Image (cartoon, rainbow, N blue to C red):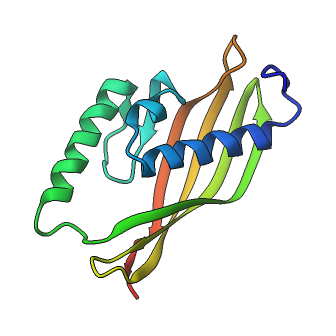
Amino acid sequence: MDPTDRSQPHEDVHRLLTGMYADYLRGAPAAIDARLTEDVTIFDSASDALVTGLEELAVLRGRRAEVAAEPSAPTWTETSLTVEDLRVREVGGVLVATWWLRVDGTDPDGAAVSPELSRNTAVLQHRADGALRILHLHEDVRQEAHPV
């Protein structure tokens, strides 16, 4: 497939997102970062501040790890992340994608928790080499996971 072919943006975006979430589950931040622009901006559900760039993203990841280690932290483990209702449109040379992310997980005993649901928006761009990268990502958790 020609990486510069813009005829299938939905499939390209779906592949990027599902790959990024698979990278997240396997704990591969460098692989995630390869899907982002260096100056990416992110509204992450774990932070009120706008994250700008990969260095600030690394700081946010560090804070998330610290919070996860606290005794009061939620005690569930993410087991799958599913992109649902993905919509993609091209606007002025960029792609705007919206989707629901379903995060399934289990509690410490292995029992399923109710899924976390978030609505997401991303602005993506094909680079000169044809690679699709995320310029901006906005995550809004609408339903937090909890024991069933």
Q: Nearer the viewer, residue 120 or 101?
A: 101
Res 63 quadrant in image? top left
Res 49 quadrant in image? top left
Residue 42, compared with residue 26, is above or below; it is above
x then y, percent, for residue 29: 39, 36
Q: Is residue 11 left or right of residue 118?
A: right
Q: Residue at x 27, y 40 (%)?
A: 60
The C terminus lies in quadrant: bottom left
x then y, percent, for residue 39: 45, 21
Residue 99, compared with residue 59, is above or below; it is below
x then y, percent, for residue 135: 55, 28
Q: Residue furthest right?
A: 7
Q: Residue at x 29, y 82 (%)?
A: 109
Q: Nearer the viewer, residue 79 or 58?
A: 79
Q: Is residue 119 left or right of residue 128?
A: left
Q: Residue at x 47, y 57 (%)?
A: 140
